[in-house]
Amino acid sequence: MADTYKAVARVVKAHGNKGKVVVAARDGLPFVLREGMRVACVPPEAKRDRFHVVESVEQGASGALVGLSGSRGRDDAEHLAGKVVLVRAADLPAGFELHDAPSLVGREVADASLGFSATIAEVMQGPANDVWVLDCDGREVLVPVIDEVVSEVPEKGPIPIRLPDGII
């Protein structure tokens, strides 16, 4: 079976003459690249490898400075600028799916004990935790994404939640 990949970051620009690039997380996702991780940079170019191994990561104010295998000079790094960085889903940290807004929007949630179901319309990023904006028959319900409310995100089917008292 083929590996599943997730788009987690983008290459912002080349940095210096040693082939390093500035990389930023995508769509409000946490930064997950780490040394030794195998990544794919897409779209691929003819005669250039799309797969790389993360050789170094240094966090900075405007993103992370990342060294990738096969990128040895300014020319190599400039060809990576603008690419999307994909990571194998199996290599992502536990709980990553709770922050993956593009895959969450449109998913159904359900609180079986209350008989409540709704659809995730938006994922807002808060300072302490994300907040899911649920569409419940045209009415918005804001739900904090915390362990007490959301314990798992299954690949398919409704996401089980436990709504706090008084939220609906």
Image (spheres, rainbow, N blue to C red):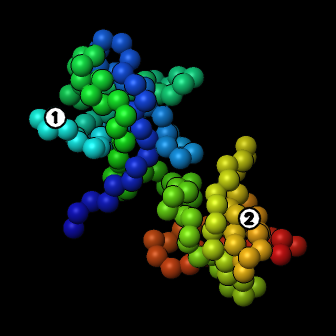
Image position of 47 (left or right of 86): left
Dot 2 amino acid type: Val
Residue 143, labelled with which disc?
2
SS label for mark 1: loop
Q: Callout 2: 10 Å neighbours few (<14), some, many (20+)?
A: many
Q: Callout 1: 10 Å neighbours few (<14), some, many (20+)?
A: few
Which x, y percent locates residue 71?
24, 25
Which x, y percent locates residue 14?
36, 21
Tell me if I can see residue 55 in this picture: no
Which x, y percent locates residue 24?
48, 34
Image position of 86 (left or right of 103): left
Contact between labelled residues 2 and 1, with CB atoms less than 8 Å apart: no
Identify which residue is drawn at 68% across, 62% down: 132
Dot 1 amino acid type: Arg
Identify which residue is drawn at 30% across, 31% down: 80
Image position of 134 (left or right of 1): right
Name, please, the residue furthest toward the left. Answer: 47
Tell me if I can see residue 90 in this picture: yes
Image quadrant in which you'd find residue 117: bottom right
SS label for mark 2: strand
Residue 48, labelled with which disc?
1
Q: How many marks?
A: 2
Instruction: Report the Cα–Cα distance between label 1 and label 2.
Output: 45 Å
Asked if residue 122 is positioned above or below residue 66 in the image, the reply reads below
